[in-house]
Image (cartoon, rainbow, N blue to C red):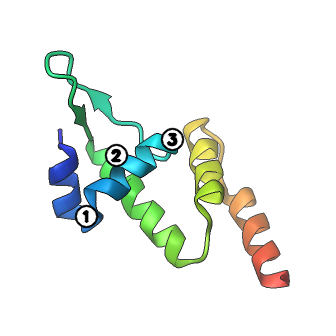
Amino acid sequence: MLTVKKLSEISGVSADTIRFYVRKGLLSPGRDAVNGYRFFSERDVRVLAFIQQAKLLGFSLNEIHGILKDSEKGRSPCAHVRSLMKHKIDV
């Protein structure tokens, strides 16, 4: 399990940005029952990497949120991503 600081160090994403993503619902860390600190899993590391790559491709945080929600619900986000990309290309 990783703290915000450790996740920031290994990802190169600032701790403030990670906290912002948590507030926006893009990352869902657990909580330590004893001290209340957030802790992040290896899955969160992968999600954070996905967020950064999707941003580089021009996706908004709202679009990324939708893609992540599709994936969490067990649905393939491919159709959603194709639709978003088609719209970006057409505009």
Given the image, on which type of amino acid does mark 3 rest?
Gly
The location of residue 7, given as percent across then percent down, is 22, 53
Picture coordinates of residue 62, whole percent (x, y): 64, 55
Left/right of residue 22 with respect to residue 2 in the rendered view = right
Helix, strand or loop under label 2: helix
Residue under pointer 2: 43
Name the residue that disc number 1 marks: 11
Residue flagged by tag 2: what amino acid is it?
A: Arg
Residue 2 location, quadrant: top left
The residue that appears at 55% across and 39% down in the rendered structure is: 72
Image location of residue 70, percent across then percent down: 64, 44
Q: Nearer the viewer, mark 1 or mark 2?
A: 1
C-alpha distance separating marks 3 and 2: 14 Å
Closer to the chain start, of discs 3 and 2, is 3
Which numbered disc, 3 or 2, marks the residue closer to the eye?
A: 3
Q: Residues within 10 Å of mark 3 (few under 14, many from 20)?
A: some
Q: Which residue is mark 3?
A: 25
Pick the residue in front: 85 or 36: 36
Whether the residues at callouts 1 and 3 have beta carbons within 8 Å, the answer is no
**Viewport quadrant of the C terminus:** bottom right
